[in-house]
Image: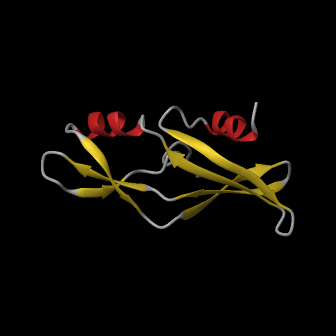
Amino acid sequence: MPPEQTFGQLLGLGKAWRVVEARFEPESSTFLLKVEETLALWPEESVRAGTPVVCHDHVEPMQWRHLNVFNKECVIVCALPRGRRGDDGRVYRVTPPREGRSKHFT
């Protein structure tokens, strides 16, 4: 199994998100995980919003610190998508994939 798929399963991202890059940066002793949305996100967002939602654009990449992996820092990087609601055209930033799943960690 490729490391991207392994990290995606370990993070519990589901079908709406995927790890597209997993690399170790030895100079900073950090694992870097790049996460992107999949097409499966938009039907979920449409149900949540109660109206059809499509991808509008993406914000600048953001970083979140995660739990250590093999005693090395782990950082998640994601350019979160912004969705556009079908009923009123409002644009909003989609919630990060792990937000709210743990009380003390991202």
Q: How many marks?
A: 0
Q: Is residue 8 left or right of residue 42?
A: right
Q: Which quadrant of the figure has residue 76? A: bottom right
Judged from this view, the residue extending furthest toward the left is 88
Residue 33 percent location from the top left of the image = 67, 52
* Residue 104 in sight in this render: no
Q: How does the figure colour the protein chain or chains? A: secondary structure
Residue 32 percent location from the top left of the image = 71, 57
Q: Is residue 68 left or right of residue 93?
A: right
In this view, the residue in front, 93 or 106, is 93
Image quadrant holding the N terminus, namely top right
Q: Residue at x 77, y 52 (%)?
A: 68
Residue 21 percent location from the top left of the image = 67, 50
Q: Is residue 25 above or below residue 45?
A: below
Q: Is residue 91 left or right of residue 69?
A: left
Q: Residue at x 17, y 54 (%)?
A: 89
* Residue 97 in sight in this render: yes
Q: Is residue 30 left or right of residue 81?
A: right
Residue 6 percent location from the top left of the image = 72, 35
Q: Which quadrant of the figure has residue 49? A: top left
